[in-house]
Amino acid sequence: MGENRNIDARSYRAHDEGIQMHGTGRDPVREAMMRHEERQEQNLSILIKQLSDPNSTLRARSAESLGNMGDERAVEPLILLLGDQVPDVVWVAIRALGTLRDPRAFEPLIRCIDSPDRWTRQGAAWALGELGDPKAGPVIIPLLTDKKKGVRQSAAEALGKIGEIRYREYLEPLLDDEELEVRHTAREALKKLK
């Protein structure tokens, strides 16, 4: 333990000596980190602005990037994007909100469950599973009988992530689903219930 402390002290001393050797008194590592943070701020601002661009592809790519950045400041702008007229943009915004796992997205995602668009329903089920809020369970259950296999699969996966034993009776019928992927997802979800 004492040896590690000595190594750390030597590292700091070497770092400080390196700064002094350059004769500038500047810390290049700290400066690089500050430039990186400034670029992140600029990128966040640009991406949020692009969510209202007329080009739907740009809106979708910006939403995806915001989800990947993991910055909670993107949540509200992404929620607004759930009202977009282009289903693909809505799908990407839903996925980004699920990735961010912010509870502010819960109610807006719940409203997406009743969408006539199968991708919106599927994405909403997946994203609600990512949030893991047990209150989503009763809203997700009806999707287990959806016409579209992807929706049934996402609903089963979401209930598995929520993980409450009371969903066993709703998941068990999917073990006989006509689609292999749905049966597999239901089996995996059942394993997670407590």
Image: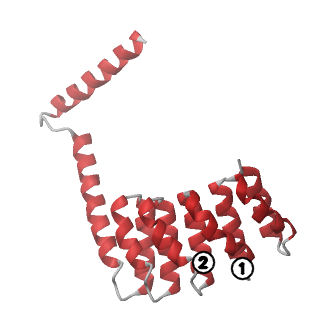
Mark 1 or mark 2, earlier in chain: 2
Disc 1/disc 2 C-alpha distance (Å)? 9 Å
Q: Is residue 51 left or right of residue 142?
A: left
- Under circle 2, the secondary element is helix
Residue 116 x/y as whole percent: 59, 87
Mark 1 Cα shell of 10 Å, populated few (<14), some (14-19), many (≥20)? some
Q: Nearer the viewer, residue 4 or 188?
A: 188
Residue 23 x/y as whole percent: 12, 33
Query: Mark 1 = which residue?
Result: 146
Give the vertical position of 100 relative to 13 (above or below). Answer: below
Query: Mark 2 = which residue?
Result: 121
The picture quadrant where one finds residue 136 is bottom right
Q: Nearer the viewer, residue 117 or 172?
A: 172
Q: Nearer the viewer, residue 109 or 10?
A: 109
Residue 51 x/y as whole percent: 36, 78
Residue 20 x/y as whole percent: 16, 29
Q: Residue at x 67, y 53 (%)?
A: 164
Q: Is residue 134 left or right of residue 55?
A: right
Give the vertical position of 148 relative to 31 (above or below). Answer: below
CB atoms of marks 1 and 2 within 8 Å:
yes
* Three-letter residue code for mark 2: Arg
Q: Residue at x 45, y 83 (%)?
A: 57
Q: Residue at x 48, y 59 (%)?
A: 101
Q: Residue at x 36, y 89 (%)?
A: 54
